[in-house]
Image (spheres, rainbow, N blue to C red):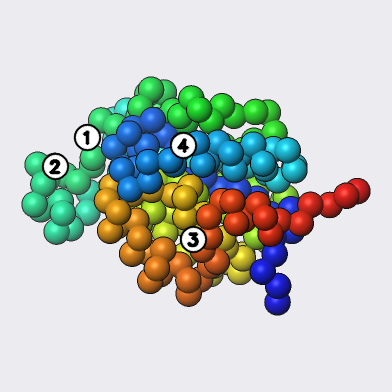
Amino acid sequence: MENTIIAEKAALVLVDMQVLAVKAFAASTPDLVPNTVAMVDFCHENKIPVIYTKLERRPDLRDIVSLCTDSALASKDPDNKGGSIFLEGGEDGAIIPELPLIPEDFLVIKKRQGAFYGSLLELYLRSLQVDTILFGGVATQFGVEGTVRVARDMDFNCVVLSDCCAAPTVESHEYPLKNIFPNMARVMTSKQAREITIVSTK
């Protein structure tokens, strides 16, 4: 077993790099956007697929189920529906302008925190013959962690790019990086990932 990444078998999955998510939930990582832009550029240059996930809700919110949680009970949102954010076609739900999609990129619409549930993510990854997923996005302890957990159970090798992930606080960002992800993934910076990536010369 070697600590390498084979470009031909890898994909970059960016979880919820959306305007509102990055603005509201990414305080832990000030350089999130430039780090992610550099990683996307590297992937494009080396023909590593880039897959964006995007949380999107119906305008009438009928695709959201109200669940009873401690945070919902303590909040001003008793229905636990999050208000009118990330609605279909809304500007707050768009992928940030610093990461313009190119025709070769993939966009996965998701309805829940984890990016696999009810989406086309697995289909795209299997079709691309990917066995290693590089992860970035917002928030580290929600969408990213939830997606990494499922990817590991699906027998994908997972690499969490620590400086391409972010959370509302440093503590909530660092806890999964130090205590959760090492048991199911490799954790490294985007620079370290680029350094160990083996690119085909064909």
Tell me whether circle 1 and circle 2 mark residues in contact (CB < 8 Å).
yes
Q: Read off the residue under disc 4.
A: 33
The disc placed on residue 77 is 2
Which quadrant of the structure image shows residue 26?
top left
Determine the CA span between mark 2 and mark 4. Answer: 30 Å
Q: Which of marks 2 and 4 is nearer the N terminus?
A: 4
Determine the CA span between mark 3 and mark 1. Answer: 27 Å
Q: Can residue 3 be seen in this view?
A: yes
Q: What residue type is labelled 3?
A: Val
The disc placed on residue 83 is 1
| Residue occupying the point 52% across, 41% down | 36
Q: What residue type is labelled 4?
A: Val
Q: Read off the residue under disc 3.
A: 148
Q: What residue type is labelled 1?
A: Gly
Tell me whether circle 1 and circle 4 mark residues in contact (CB < 8 Å).
no
Q: What residue type is labelled 2?
A: Asp
The disc placed on residue 142 is none
Q: Which of marks 3 and 1 is in front?
A: 3
Q: Earlier in the sequence, mark 1 or mark 4?
A: 4
Q: In this view, does 196 lie above or below 42?
A: below
In terms of secondary structure, where does tag 4 sit?
helix
| Residue occupying the point 38% across, 22% down | 91
